[in-house]
Image: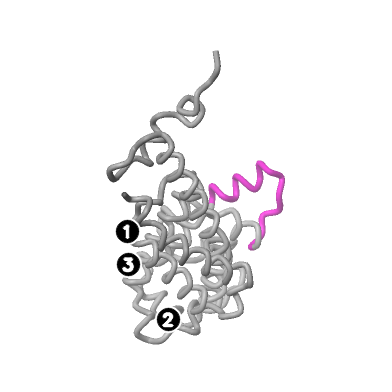
Amino acid sequence: MTKSISNLLSDKRLDGYRGGTRNDLQMILHRYNYNIELSNEFYPFLSIFEVAFRNSLHLSWGKHFQDSNWICNYKKYSLAIIETSKIEDAIDELTNKRKPINGDGLIAELNLGFWVNLFDHRYLEINKKTIKDSFPNATNKQRDIFRIKSQLNDIRNLRNRIFHHEPIWNWNNLEDFLNNLKNFILWMDKDLLLPRVVKSEESLKVLIERQKLMLK
């Protein structure tokens, strides 16, 4: 028996590409392809942001603790149980992979959620003292810790949607995501806007302009 597209992609997944007045298979697949294009062009932004953000936060907290290897010495500091558990899970994972337990390994192994959660209210006093080091190029107004946490949660949601091949084609705030990602990167270091990232920004602006055609 020949497998149909709906079998191979699954009806449940294709349902995420229904909307507007046109929902024939051709239009659904057109939206599916558009979603792939969007995800592909967001990836360079997300990749640069995530790596730089983890390292920037780790460095600024290390400066605060006067311990450049604080992530390995986490038991010395007042981290919440949820963060402590995630570090211990990361250590177990590195052990299972037979990789060395060191700062670089833990920074890479801990997921984006761990680093975003370091902006939770329980770490407010630490962030007040580290925010300028975390985002040296941001203005005082831009260093609004509560707004930053909200934006970071939004970016994490976008990242997870893209990495799990979920629809973002019909989100009405894609331009906001683009601007926020660019801002975070600039706040850390303008040289992080590599040529591929700049190219993706140009492509995303064009793709976002096309969105209204997908929503018809």
Could you tell which of marks 3 and 1 lies nearer the N-terminus?
3
Label 3 or label 1, whichever lies nearer to me, is 1
Q: Is residue 129 above or below residue 160?
A: below
Label 2 or label 1, whichever lies nearer to me, is 1
Residue farthest toward the left in the current orientation of the protein: 21
Q: Position of residue 95 (x, y in %)?
A: 66, 45
The crowd level at tag 1 (other Cα within 10 Å; few <14, some 14-19, many 20+) is few
The crowd level at tag 2 (other Cα within 10 Å; few <14, some 14-19, many 20+) is few
What is the C-alpha distance between the residues marked 2 and 1?
35 Å
The crowd level at tag 3 (other Cα within 10 Å; few <14, some 14-19, many 20+) is few
Q: Which residues are magenta?
A: 88-103
Residue to which mark 1 is pinned: 172
* The stretch drawn in magenta includes residue 99: yes
Could you tell which of marks 3 and 2 lies nearer the N-terminus?
3
Q: Position of residue 208 (x, y in %)?
A: 42, 61
* Residue displayed at 32% across by 41% down: 22
Q: Are marks 3 and 2 in contact (CB under 8 Å)?
A: no
* The stretch drawn in magenta includes residue 123: no
Residue placed most toward the observer, 40 or 59: 40
Picture quarter with the N terminus? top right
What is the C-alpha distance between the residues marked 3 and 2?
14 Å
Could you tell which of marks 2 and 1 lies nearer the N-terminus?
2
Q: Which kind of residue does numbered mark 3 sit on?
A: His
Q: Position of residue 199 (x, y in %)?
A: 58, 68
Q: Position of residue 110 (x, y in %)?
A: 54, 55
Residue to which mark 2 is pinned: 129
Residue placed most toward the observer, 161 or 51: 161
Q: Which kind of residue does numbered mark 2 sit on?
A: Lys
